[in-house]
Amino acid sequence: MSVDPLAFVRPCIARMEAYVPGEQPGTGGFIKLNTNENPYPPPAAVLERIRAACNGDLRLYPDASAREVRCRLATLFGVPMETTIVGNGSDELLSIILRAFVDPGQTVAFPTPTYSYYHQLVQTQGGQIRTVDFPDDYALPAGLARTGARVLLLANPNAPSGTLLPLAQVAELAERCAGMLVLDEAYVDFATEGGVRLFERHPNVIVLRTMSKSFSLAGMRIGFGFAVPEIIAQLWKIKDHYNLNRLSLVAAAAALDHIDAMRANARRIGQTRAALTGALRDLGFRVWDSQANFVLAQRQTPPAKILYEALKSRRILVRFFDQPRLRDCLRITVGTPEQVARLVAELDDLIRHP
Ligand SMILES: *Cc1c(COP(=O)(O)O)cnc(C)c1O
């Protein structure tokens, strides 16, 4: 007897559209300004520690408690180790959090437009998505605290706008919302303030960080979570025991030992961001004030989709979103000054000679 294997797929999965990550061209010499990676390599000392860890010990499982990394996080942020957890990227931590808090039918709210992967994460749990539109200036939507959602997801700085909500407003949201507040601080090292320790006064807050952007380690898949120990203990039950491999654990510890290099890169990127923002505004783009390593730029003519395609044919990748709220928008990662100069020159040419 033949059965239809698709008949056994959970309906919420069958209905769900797959997340589409930014393109990762293997070849072609692209200037890659489409996935918010860091244009600068990790420090040589970090690469050396990873290479040194490529030895016979790889036959052994990694440290399931990630002690070396969590110990450094505790020192760096001045929090107890019991308030920390590491993930295979912060994407894994998001997934663990939703598995811990969301049963089928329960509501998860987030302001939009934001990191679109939140949709798949909630749908995988069979959760109910409740979106609240950001206003045009990406201020905190008044209705967000009143959704009654079990979990609120808030990327701050937000993607793809790059805008930052003041920490005082986030704290107030934590106070007023009826559930958990997950503060996704993937881009916070490029911003003026962050809220790692918000959970100390607001036990319904979980803060997430990542080494993918500011630490130049997207390829190693390392994320951090911070919450009260009782919450961390619940998340711990769900995570794969060995969610970070030995090389990632070494890379994370080494990168935290060389945090000054990350901070110097973040400063350089901040300076290049200011130059890019100014140049795009001179070209007639509307650019939101970004506190991240990318900017959102809007211009009606030529249409953003045409610009995106023309840039691609000139070997520059940026992100275009086919969404009504992001009409005529490009999200452009802040690269090196040289990459940004190339991009601006090409855009100038495309706008002058459409
Ligand atoms: C990049 C990003 C993530 C995922 O980071 P990883 O640590 O690479 O999984 C999560 N949230 C936001 C808003 C991001 O931009």
Image (cartoon, rainbow, N blue to C red):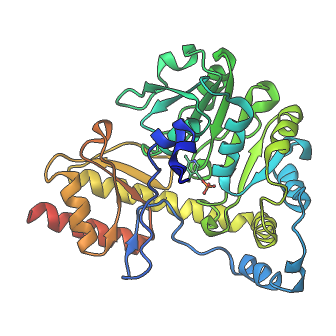
The answer to whether residue 63 of the structure is visible from this angle is yes
Q: Position of residue 11 (x, y in %)?
A: 52, 36
Is 316 displayed left or right of 86 in the figure? Answer: left
Is 194 displayed left or right of 8 in the figure? Answer: right
Picture quadrant where residue 344 is located: bottom left
Q: Nearer the viewer, residue 237 or 331?
A: 237
Q: Position of residue 292 (x, y in %)?
A: 51, 50
For the view shown, which residue lies furthest in the front direction? 1
The answer to whether residue 80 of the structure is visible from this angle is no
Q: Nearer the viewer, residue 1 or 157?
A: 1
Picture quadrant where residue 245 is located: bottom right
Is 164 displayed left or right of 33 in the figure? Answer: right
Give the total number of marks visible in the rendering.
0
Q: Position of residue 17 (x, y in %)?
A: 44, 45
Q: Position of residue 334 (x, y in %)?
A: 44, 61
Q: Residue at x 68, y 50 (%)?
A: 92
The relative height of residue 279 versus residue 207 in the rendered view (above or below) is below
The relative height of residue 246 versus residue 34 in the rendered view (above or below) is below
Q: Nearer the viewer, residue 149 or 241?
A: 241
Is 323 displayed left or right of 265 in the figure? Answer: left
Picture quadrant where residue 101 is located: top right
Q: Residue at x 78, y 41 (%)?
A: 226
Q: Residue at x 88, y 86 (%)?
A: 56
Q: Residue at x 64, y 17 (%)?
A: 177
Q: Where the C terminus falls, by quadrant?
A: bottom left
The relative height of residue 134 versus residue 90 in the rendered view (above or below) is above
